[in-house]
Image: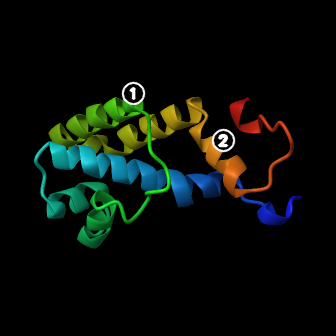
Amino acid sequence: MTEEKLKLIQPQEIEAWYILPIIRKELALAMKAEGLDQQSLAKLLGITPAAVSQYVNNKRASDYTLEHGLKKEFTLSAKQIVDDNTLIFSEVQRLLKILWDQGIVCEIHQEKSWCPDNCEVCLK
C-alpha cells in the first residue's frame, strides 16, 4: 500500500460517500433549472433545505465535475422526477449505473482508496 492511500475503502463506501452526493448535487441543479424551489428540492431528494443550498452553491460534492453529456442524463432524470416523484429511486439507480458504466466510480475509488495495480474488479 502506498503511504497516501493506506485506507482500504470498499466500492460501496465510495458510492455512499462520493457518488450519491454527486448525484444529489446534479439532480438539485437540474431540478432548480426546472423551476423548483429549495424546499421542494429538499423534499424530492429526501435531504434538508440546508443540504440543497450547499449543493447548489457548490459547497458540497464540489470535487468532481461531470462531462456535458452526463449532465444531459441528470436533466432527463430531473424532468422525470419532477413529473412523477415516485421515480426518484429508479432514476437515482439509473444514474448510478451510468456512473459505473462510465468508470467514474472506479476513478474515484482508485483516487481515494488503496486498490491493486490494474484493478478492474468493478468493471467485471
Q: Residue at x 49, y 56 (%)?
A: 63
Q: Of 124 and 35, which appears nearest the observer?
A: 35
Residue 86 in picture, x, y percent from top left: 26, 44
Residue occupied by mark 1: 69
Tell me which amino acid carries mark 2: Cys
Q: Is residue 7 visible?
A: no
Q: Residues within 10 Å of mark 1 (few under 14, many from 20)?
A: few
50 w.r.t. 112: above or below: below
Q: Earlier in the sequence, mark 1 or mark 2?
A: 1
**Secondary element at tag 2:** helix
Please tell me the numbered disc located at residue 106: 2
Name of the residue lying farthest toward the right: 1
Residue 32 in picture, x, y percent from top left: 18, 50
Give the quadrant of residue 124.
top right
Number of numbered markers = 2
| In this rendering, position of residue 76 left or right of residue 68 | left
Check the image and tell me how it is coloured.
rainbow
Please tell me the numbered disc located at residue 6: none
**Secondary element at tag 1:** helix
Q: Residue at x 36, y 38 (%)?
A: 91
